Image (spheres, grey):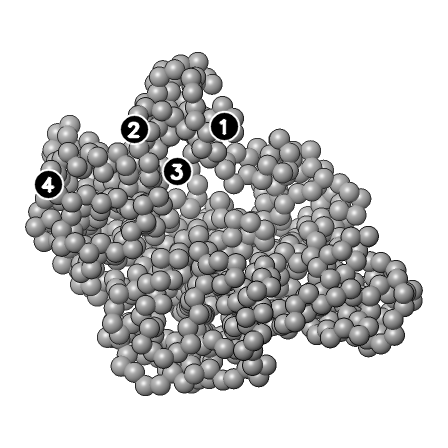
Amino acid sequence: MSNQQPSLLGDESAGRVARVLVDTPVPHLDRLFDYAIGEHDVQVGSLVRVKMSGRRMNGFVIEIAEHSEFEGKLAPIERVVSAVPLVNERMINLGRDLARRNGTSLAKVLGAMVPDRHASAEKSFLSHWNRQAGMPSPGGVGTPSDIWNFFAGGAALLKRIGSGESPRAVWQLLPGVYPATLEPHPFVDLVRESLNSGRRALIVVPTAKDVTQTARVFEDTGWKIATQSSEDTKYRRYKTYLEILSGGVDVVIGTRSSVYSPLPNLGLILVVDSGDDRLSDPQAPYLSALDIAIRRSHLEGAALVSAGMSISIAEAQLIQSRWAPPLVPDLEVMRAKTAQVQVPDDFDRDREGPAGYSRIPPSVQSFIRRSLDEGPVLVHVPSSGWVSVIVCDRCGQGARCSYCHGPLRGQADGSLSCMWCDRPQVGWRCNNCAGTKWRSTRVGSARTAEEFGRAFPGVIIEMADGDHPVQEFTKTSGIVIATPGSEPVATEGYAGAVVLDASAILGRPELWAPSEAIRRWMNVLGLVRPEGKMVIVGVRDQMIRQALIRRDPLGFARRLLDEREQLRFFPSVCMVAIDGDRKDVDSFTSELTVPKRCELVGIAPRVGRDVQKTFGPDQTRAIYRCPWDSAQTFIDSVRTTQIARSMKRAGAVSVRVNPSQLI
């Protein structure tokens, strides 16, 4: 980046100058400012305190120069905040790349990379800091998992990583790999080969529970393992970051933000279940772990493996473009190693009469009773609570909160509360017809557990959801009622699984609904014994039914990708969303220079719990569509318009490239 003028004039200091990126969200200040170093010990990556426009602010030293092109007097660096340089050249290069490709600021990306400083953690780290980062531990020799025998190209992948190459692959897993229960585990084989090539490894998983389960398979390896998750304290998060940065860690296993982990000499990035929305940042800079891993793999020359029980549309695009070949078992192997999947259709349900269309048909109840003789049964429901979706009994309109207009949920005692703000709704009336009575359209996990308690007396019923986390179900028999992402692992696998209310997700209008449904249900399938069976109730789409019965997520993802190409939606094109108050979005779009072949799809109001209320009462989104060869030009134009509007203090908007709601 070229030299910039300083933000503040002060006493002139001779000697070198630091080019500082000040931590500010203001778009037109996303550039480097020159400050006099003076007597401070400053390096590239140092966190420093500087003055800008009369305010003291933190910033990162991005460059150090022998002199400044600015002819006036430079303001001095007031102090060095951290004794440890917190970012390095690799992180800065990655940050610049991600910022440009996603129409955001470098300061926001670096802010996502570096955890908040904790003085006590830094002091503890400095007491044993060795400034000379050593080589990673040797991987050694181990017995590879038998699972590799079921993948054509699996042995070649390991060999290439071990020889120092950087292959890429989209890996469809078999049960026991994720969640991690196999011994020996194939993740260990991948990491071993990376360490044997003299390079470190990074594993990114969706949840803290996954971090614990994955770390368990590395316990006896003797390697230096660091874990990172949202459950870490600020002290632990910052100290772990410093240990990783210093080169004192061989393998990092963590949740979404760990994809930024500053491992020196990175050789392998393994992203698990990349389609999980918990691997996408809901806050600026709104990046997904897979997108970051792809760019980091390219910039740092690291191998990249994206693994999961299902294949996302983004992964299917990587396969189709030949950027990453598929590592997928044959369908015969998939059928032999996974449980049978049964998806009753209308003919099957007609045979049972009216009861066949009930929430839990008699045939499903009989299946659960038979399966309980063999072991535990997992019942998958789409949402937690008592009654998760309610509507007015008179007009059928969805019940909404009187304060924030979020959807309401019902409790066992008949009371109502908001799913967004949790406010109780006393004396609720329908906004449409003023009706006071409501009825449920979707039953939550709590009510499901009560219903199963009555239907299966004497059977252990355990509930697993966000409010009742369960790591592992150790009993030999029983029913586990679980919501998506909360399914516990059974000690020897589930004898059977039932997915209820499949239409709850398949009936959603979002483009991602079919892909997300397959992802959730394939993850459930991975928890069932190969000799068991899984029943999914409520699927009417024939294409989805066949994909589930065949256990062919790759074929299904390819079909969805073909549809996206015909409709001209992501990932066949780049989608850019401009969010803000209506008047600001309108003025922004009028000022924006749109390259040829890019088009404005439309401007529409926004509703939902993820809407940024800071942008005014009339929330609006403008959506643009660009072919990939024009996308960067358009994103640069969006950023230029943002900066120009920031300089004249026009209303702010938020920019999101390929937001998750559109993919």
Residue under circle 3? 508
First in sequence: mark 3 vs mark 1: 1
* Front one among 298 and 566: 298
**Label 4 secondary element:** loop
Front: mark 1 or 4: 4
- Residue 439: image tag: none
The answer to whether the residues at label 1 and label 4 have Cβ atoms under 8 Å apart is no
Q: What's under tag 3, amino acid-wise?
A: Arg
**Label 2 secondary element:** loop
Residue under circle 2? 412
- Residue 458: image tag: 4
Q: Is residue 298 visible?
A: no
Which quarter of the picture shows residue 616? top right
Q: How far, Cα to Cα, is label 2 from label 1? A: 22 Å
Seen in the image, is 40 located left or right of residue 362?
Answer: right
- Residue 405: image tag: 1
* Front one among 110 and 582: 110
